[in-house]
Image (cartoon, coloured by chain):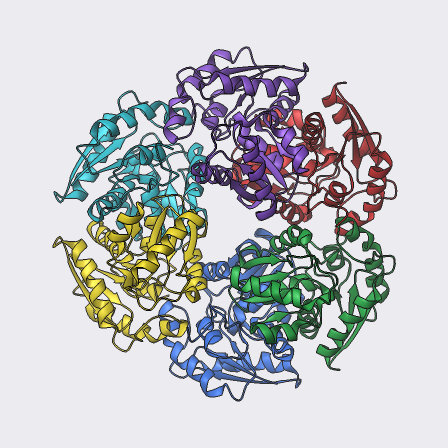
Chain colours: A purple, B cyan, C yellow, D blue, E green, F red
């Protein structure tokens, strides 16, 4: 089994972070490859960013459909995931959808750790798109703007506030770039901390193994 | 006041239909222009179609921002409307959002006339995006596939079924290409029939006159 | 085009405030008249107040149906709006419904500025009646009781709290008597501030121009 | 204990029907009186009807507050119930609210038997007002217009359709004038059939005995 | 009429507290008996506790079905209530369901006083099970862990916080063991305070008198 | 990795069916064992059945906690799943929850194939418990009662009705005993058909591999 993880942005550092988390989970049981998206912005933050990475992402899927068994979109906002579900016959999984749906099985409510308060409304829109709004404790960003994604202490503090103030029972990392702090955070907090890349691998590898993919009947039918 | 209506597809016939409806409403009180989207597919039906018209639509907005006071997206699925709300300081209105929110003020529940049963799930997703799912009687498409958008009798029959079977009290035309049959249908049915192009002009011209545009605080902030 | 704005209460000062905002928006493009309701209480605050202004409001509509093309109910609680939608064939628009539905198109969530904490539950009931509860950031009243509606600083402070604490992206003035502070507030806050009177004029004048009115099929049928 | 049942309309026959059902339930354990509303329409069907019975209903409450321990509004649309909850310190119960909330405890979903298809939207609005929309199987009216409320066979047939087609498990009589057919219908259908008058008496007499009435803190505070 | 109140736990002190409240309400108009559940845990706090009291509760119902006209489950989490509704032909009422549905008729939103913050998620699950989530102001537990259920001042303080911070208008006692503080709390707070045991007696005695019980059509059919 | 699949009933034939599906999916990559529940009823259909299998299920978990890495509850109603999540530190997954949450990622709406119309309300309750009610096309049972679970043609016909009448895009097998017909049905229907046993294995094996289990903070804390 071979799974292609598409990083919708063009940042090689974040691509490497994602790959590391993925390889560690795959443990040689299946192959994972991680590609950045040519022509995409360095970060995906706005609606226009979603558009700017779209062509590159679809091209990656089309060029690699023969070589891979499933595709993962590795940005927590799941940009262009619907289009990818539509164009490929292989399973397509977003790290946002996978992580939040798995989180919903593990406790009463979950909080999404976000990098900046500006992204809260957009994440709320996504949560509701997946019908998870009533399982959401909060989308929580550090009170003070963070300097970089490596600012572990800020995220720890933010997660603690989600647990105590919003009664979160599960933490979801709201950015692919946070992959790698899940276990450290989980050990400190004592509750499940979910990295979307791994969650998407769980779903994608399972679907491949089971021989299931997206329904092409109507919503994701590319040819109607 | 000048309003630019963007037809997200590249069909000159549909562009003309839209323009005619718009000019008739504007009646010389404000100027409307209607442009098709260069490089866009002939029809917008799939998620990939939304992506393929995106660049062209954004380019139209950017090139014309100085000359117009508001922008209208004239496809009932409101493709790339969020991105346009984000990139321009002028009001941006979709014919889907405008028509369905106005419909919600005029009766208990509304039905959306759609051209094909394949588009029903996508329209339901859109209705819920706008938080209108509980005001929706049904998305209704002709039982038999239609040959073209001019198949008036099919839409009349479909609207009657929506009224009698689903208890719709207002009809929304679910495709910009249906602009022009609203009054004929309304006269026959005896209940309000809304063309999205006109509804979007109502909102857009009103916002311009009032000096109101999209909030750029967080969700539609292009620069965070 | 002539639009009658009905102030459900009997306060001539508030009637004047409303009229001023309306005339300024109409700018001579259409005529607006503003009438207070004979026999109504000075303020509309309770359920009984709604009843006490009902007869007068309906009488105003009936006496003026021939002379006007649309009716606006200019109290943010939209008292007796359903009955007016029922008895007249002309469009009938409430400033509560119009302002909050327009607000829902302009940003992620809106807050309603209210005059007193006692009115919060009633406004929440209204918001849910219009199916807007998931677009509501908060109904927010000044922490300290205000002396009068001219206490601008209290409303500014309340709006800022809505923006920062409740993540509101749009502000709706929750009382017709606040008409007139919209632009000042908007300039200071940097996000859209909506006066219901103007919003209702946008919808009402548009409906008249478009030849659309309330569906009389079932819910608003006066004769079944 | 003395409970006043207010029939919002002015029909003496329906008043008698209501009284009979009430007296039969009270069985001498408490006193019930049933009054029609002076000045009210003969039937309550429209929004304007609600207004036309309002003054009379409030007057009845005020004149009788000293003599009674609770008030019941005996029209299934609960007209002016909010205002009555507001003006009296005694418990005020509507037959719509009481019957549907009790129904929600007795089975998966309930259907409301209505007299005419025109009333379906209004009843759906009421059901949602009470947050019961997800417990509703259907509002169901006889397919053929009924000649009078005594058309038992039509209601039996309608109830059977609700059970079989909409999977209703409980039937609620949607009109005070149907009081009296509950037991006959229940025997034939084999599932609970609820008359709102009795349901309101259950709640009202219980509240009186328990010393509980409407909260006057904010929503029903008559003096803020 | 004879009503059996089943205390799902095996604590004789709490059983006595419940009985006292019940007898005081019944006032000799009907008989109430209160039994603890043999073999049950001393307190019902976890999902496993629900299971451990199940056999004993069902046995109590079966052994006493001939002698009683209705059954009440006197733990605010309504453990095993669905099974009891299923196995008996007599009305079965939970103190959680009864108190919260009655609360929903008395004011805008209610808060549930809980004994410990750990129980908040479970109570939220219950509130949603009864479709009351939008009528809930909050589930509120004392900030500091309480020493015992007699810690009146903690609950008073908690109720005040629910009123002021969460805008609760009605208070529901969230534990059968709190029976007895309702009137004292109500006098101090000035808003309705509901003890579930009494609320369940209101519903159960009313259903018995009316000749209504659980629908056995599908959801609670013991024999399909 | 070793996963224990608990069949909540005591039917060895159904246990064998489940095991076969599980072993086929595991393909030797991890070990699966499948046990029936001693003392449980032969079928799990009622609320009392849930109780009667509870002790046996919990005992199985406790006795086998040391030997297994995860537990699966293999009845589509997920009986006692909450209690098992509570008592074990290992991941616990229900076939109902897993299959329906995976279904929600694969198409617009899913239908659950049920064995009998009597089970529809109970399944609707379960779907809503998992917050999936808006992703549900229908719970659909064969129109004519089936003789046994091997009545493939009935389920095929039922699935086709779900697709055509309710617009289902994904089919979920609503009974563990249907394991084994998934691929045959999928080939005939052309859309994804999900067996819950496999879906639960996907989630459970993934959680084990990832080192994630149920949050014990509050809702599933066995010791508060």
Vertical arrangement, residue C90 with respect to residue A177, above or below: below
Q: Position of residue E157 (x, y in %)?
A: 61, 65
Residue situated in front as seen by the camera: D189 or E3: E3
In this rendering, the answer to whether F181 lies above or below C78 is: above
Tell me if A81 is positioned left or right of F217 in this view.
Answer: left
Tell how many labels: 0
B147 vs D220, nearest the viewer? D220
- Image height check: is D105 above or below B203? below
Quadrant showing the N terminus of chain E: bottom right
Left/right placement of residue A57 relative to residue A196 reads left
Quadrant in which residue B37 is drawn: top left
Task: Report the residue at 32% width, 49% height from top.
Answer: C102
Question: Where is residue A72 shown, x and y percent of the image?
Answer: 54, 22
- Residue A50 lies in quadrant: top left
Q: Nearer the viewer, residue E68 or B51?
A: B51
The image shows residue E209 at horizontal and vertical percentages of: 69, 75
User: Relative to residue F6, is residue E215 drawn left or right?
Assistant: left
In the visual, does E37 lie left or right of D124?
A: right
Residue lying at 63% horizontally and 76% vertically, measured from the top left: D206
- Mark yes or no: residue A109 visible: yes
Is residue A70 visible in this depiction of the protein?
no
Residue at the (22%, 70%) spot, across then down: C13
* Residue A178 place in picture, x, y as percent: 55, 27
Q: Residue at x 77, y 61 (%)?
A: E88
């Amino acid at each position: 089994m071979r799974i292609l993880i598409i990083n919708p942005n063009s940042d090689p550092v974040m691509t490497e972070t994602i790959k590391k988390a993925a390889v560690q989970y795959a443990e040689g049981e299946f192959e994972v490859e991680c590609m950045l998206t040519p022509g995409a912005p360095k970060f995906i933050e706005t609606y226009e960013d979603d558009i700017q990475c779209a062509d590159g992402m679809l091209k990656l899927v089309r060029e690699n459909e023969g070589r891979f068994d499933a595709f993962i979109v590795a940005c927590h906002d799941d940009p262009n995931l619907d289009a990818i579900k539509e164009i490929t016959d292989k399973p397509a999984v977003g790290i946002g959808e996978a992580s939040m749906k798995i989180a919903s099985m593990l406790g009463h409510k979950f909080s999404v750790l976000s990098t900046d308060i500006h992204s809260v409304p957009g994440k709320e829109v996504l949560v509701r798109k997946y019908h998870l709004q009533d399982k959401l404790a909060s989308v929580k960003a550090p009170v003070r703007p963070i300097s970089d994604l490596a600012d572990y202490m800020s995220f720890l503090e933010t997660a603690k506030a989600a647990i105590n103030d919003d009664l979160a029972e599960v933490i979801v990392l709201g950015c692919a770039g946070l992959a790698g702090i899940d276990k450290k955070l989980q050990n400190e907090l004592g509750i499940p901390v979910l990295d979307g890349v791994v969650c998407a691998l769980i779903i994608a590898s399972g679907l491949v193994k089971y021989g299931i993919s997206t329904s092409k009947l109507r919503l994701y039918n590319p040819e109607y």
